[in-house]
């Protein structure tokens, strides 16, 4: 069986604690995984600190760091088959999703390298500088030692989005992968060594809440970057507040998908299903609230119910499968509880609502794609489920759609479907959310920022904003008043 060790200061080590990670599709053992002790976590932070102040890392220029990012990208591509298989077994991702994840992680490192080569770490501000008086620079410098925590839904991509800007910015980190899915981050560790990343720049451990809390407490950690649920994000922000750590949060969502009455129905129906069923509903940006204008609602609903039956349910490693299990029994139970609550609250079940049965699915955590017609008071309209359950609400018009879409503590993503681009843009501009697609869903561009409004997060990943999240900015004032009499302000004290 594969062994997943702790990656500290460029070396792989075991520890006295371990567990067996299981395949969500069939319960089979995937790997023996070592959990860090507190001493291991401290060692990892010490290694990150030593690397941050090491002459080698400090002196490494941005082109050399970009080269390392490009090498990582290449090596991810070289090992794509192995990474895909491991991601499928460890996270229950379907083949097509797992392949896309490996591709997306590799292309993220490549795009980031391009951004890094062009990024200006020193910018003279012509507006602020005055000839004969001063010239003023903004100097971007790495924040320092970071602690990064990721969830289980896109293990390799989440690790890439965290580690990429560490290397690009010149920071160092201890990344904690989710205990549910620790495998592919460990392969990334091997790849970083092969790509020539200096020891200690990136350290990788795994574990749950206890290991995460212990890591964040270390006084050497200057920045915390967390991706996960809003509930845990809130706790992390409270703790970071007492320590005044720099903080980035990528949290939950309850994204609105708005179908206007002039949408192309066949595309919008497939789009609405893709928006909430991708990765069995375990994507943070899932379109889990669907608003449809009344005029087309009956036809749309009928088409949606018919089409959902075409979703290809199966074992994740079958290339034909488009829809697999949810991550574990705990998540299965949470989702089933939401389904029961919705039934009790009077939500109208349109499709699904039970365990998914079928040949070979008995040992996995499968739930039927589930469609409910609900009103805004009902629980599933408001709470993130993180599973394959769609809350559908007909709306009178565009204005009502916007109002209800914004009636949420979340603001991560959303979409508008219409053949009239101006109309769609008008609606999109009024949505309080970090990403809006028009006639599209889930696609991300590594050159563009991703993150949330409201309780979906603070800060952005990817794009220039994602790099700047790991940089401090220093104002460098260079005086051109080189004679004492040109400095009359000194006289304020004489
Ligand atoms: P979670 O909040 O339960 O756990 C996330 C990570 O935090 C895990 O590594 C976990 O071990 C760790 N953790 C848990 N409690 C902790 C604590 N008290 N201190 C420190 N670390 C702690 O979330 P999850 O169930 O793993 O993931 C699903 C959630 O992640 C959903 O809410 C989803 O929307 C969100 N998510 C957001 C984004 C985004 O970019 N906004 C991306 C993916 C997932």
Image: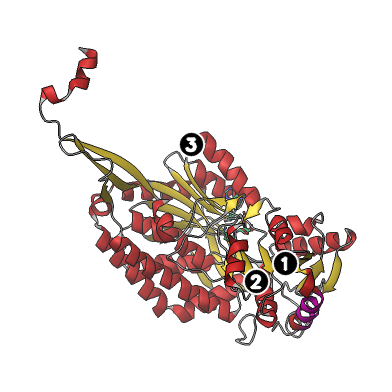
Cα separation, mark 1 vs mark 2, equals 10 Å
Rate crowding at label 3 as few (under 14), some (14 to 19) or many (20 or more) other CA atoms within 10 Å.
few
**Marks 1 and 2 close (CB-CB < 8 Å):** yes
Q: Is 300 a magenta residue?
A: yes
Cα separation, mark 1 vs mark 3, equals 39 Å
- Please give the range of residues in magenta: 298-306
Magenta stretch, overall SS:
helix
- Give me the disc on residue 244: 3
Rate crowding at label 1 as few (under 14), some (14 to 19) or many (20 or more) other CA atoms within 10 Å.
many
- Give me the disc on residue 111: none
Quarter assignment of residue 63: bottom left
Q: Is 249 a magenta residue?
A: no
State whether residue 193 is above or below residue 125: below
- Mark 3 or mark 2: which is in front? 2
Give the tally of numbered discs.
3
Cα separation, mark 3 vs mark 2, equals 37 Å
Q: How is the image coloured?
A: secondary structure
Name the residue carrying label 1.
290
Quarter assignment of residue 220: top left
Residue drawn at x 60%, y 86% is 319
* Of pointers 3 and 2, the one earlier in the residue sequence: 3
Q: Is residue 9 visible?
A: no
Which of these two is toward me, 118 or 38?
118
Q: Position of residue 427 (x, y in %)?
A: 63, 62
Looking at the image, the residue that sits furthest to the top is 494
The C terminus: image quadrant: top left
* Of pointers 1 and 2, the one earlier in the residue sequence: 2
Q: In the figure, is residue 15 to the left or right of 69?
A: right
């Amino acid at each position: 069986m594969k062994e997943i060790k702790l990656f500290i200061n460029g070396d792989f080590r075991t520890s006295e604690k371990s567990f067996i990670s299981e395949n969500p599709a069939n319960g089979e053992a995937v790997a023996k995984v070592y959990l860090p002790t507190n001493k291991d976590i401290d060692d990892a932070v010490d290694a990150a600190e030593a690397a941050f102040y090491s002459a080698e890392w400090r002196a490494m220029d941005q082109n050399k760091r970009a080269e390392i990012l490009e090498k990582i990208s290449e090596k991810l591509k070289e090992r794509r088959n192995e990474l895909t298989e491991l991601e499928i077994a460890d996270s229950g991702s379907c083949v097509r999703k797992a392949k896309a994840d490996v591709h997306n992680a590799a292309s993220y490192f490549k795009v980031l390298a391009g951004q890094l080569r062009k990024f200006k770490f020193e910018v003279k501000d012509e507006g602020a500088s005055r000839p004969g008086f001063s010239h003023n620079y903004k100097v971007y410098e790495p924040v320092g030692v970071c602690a990064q925590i990721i969830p289980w839904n896109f293990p390799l991509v989440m690790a890439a989005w965290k580690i990429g800007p560490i290397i690009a910015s010149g920071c160092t980190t201890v990344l904690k992968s989710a205990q549910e899915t620790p495998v592919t981050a460990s392969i990334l560790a091997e790849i970083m060594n092969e790509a020539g990343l200096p020891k200690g720049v990136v350290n990788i451990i795994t574990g749950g809440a206890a290991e995460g809390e212990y890591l964040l407490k270390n006084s050497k950690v200057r920045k915390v970057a967390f991706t996960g649920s809003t509930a845990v994000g809130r706790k992390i922000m409270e703790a970071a507040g007492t320590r005044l750590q720099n903080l980035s949060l990528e949290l939950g969502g309850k994204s609105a998908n708005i179908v206007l009455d002039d949408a192309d129905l066949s595309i919008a129906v497939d789009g609405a299903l893709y928006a909430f069923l991708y990765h069995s509903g375990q994507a943070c940006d899932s379109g889990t609230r669907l608003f449809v204008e009344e005029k087309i609602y009956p036809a749309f609903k009928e088409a949606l119910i018919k089409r959902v039956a075409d979703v290809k349910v199966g074992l994740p490693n079958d290339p034909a499968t488009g829809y697999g299990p949810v991550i574990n029994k705990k998540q299965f139970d949470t989702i089933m509880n939401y389904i029961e609550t919705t039934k009790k609250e009077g939500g109208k079940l349109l499709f699904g609502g039970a365990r998914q049965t079928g040949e070979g699915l008995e040992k996995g955590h499968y739930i039927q794609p589930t469609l409910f017609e609900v009103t805004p008071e009902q629980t599933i309209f408001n709470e993130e489920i993180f599973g394959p359950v769609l809350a559908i609400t007909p709306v009178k018009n565009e204005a009502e759609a916007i109002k209800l879409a914004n009636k949420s503590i979340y603001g991560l993503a959303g979409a508008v479907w219409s053949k009239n681009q101006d109309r769609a843009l008008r609606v999109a501009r009024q949505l309080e959310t970090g990403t809006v697609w028009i006639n599209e869903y889930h696609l991300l561009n590594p050159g563009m920022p991703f993150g949330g409004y409201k309780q979906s997060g603070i800060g952005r990943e990817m794009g220039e904003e994602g790099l700047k999240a790991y940089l401090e900015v220093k104002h460098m004032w260079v005086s051109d008043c080189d004679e004492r009499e040109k400095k009359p302000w000194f006289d304020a004290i004489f």
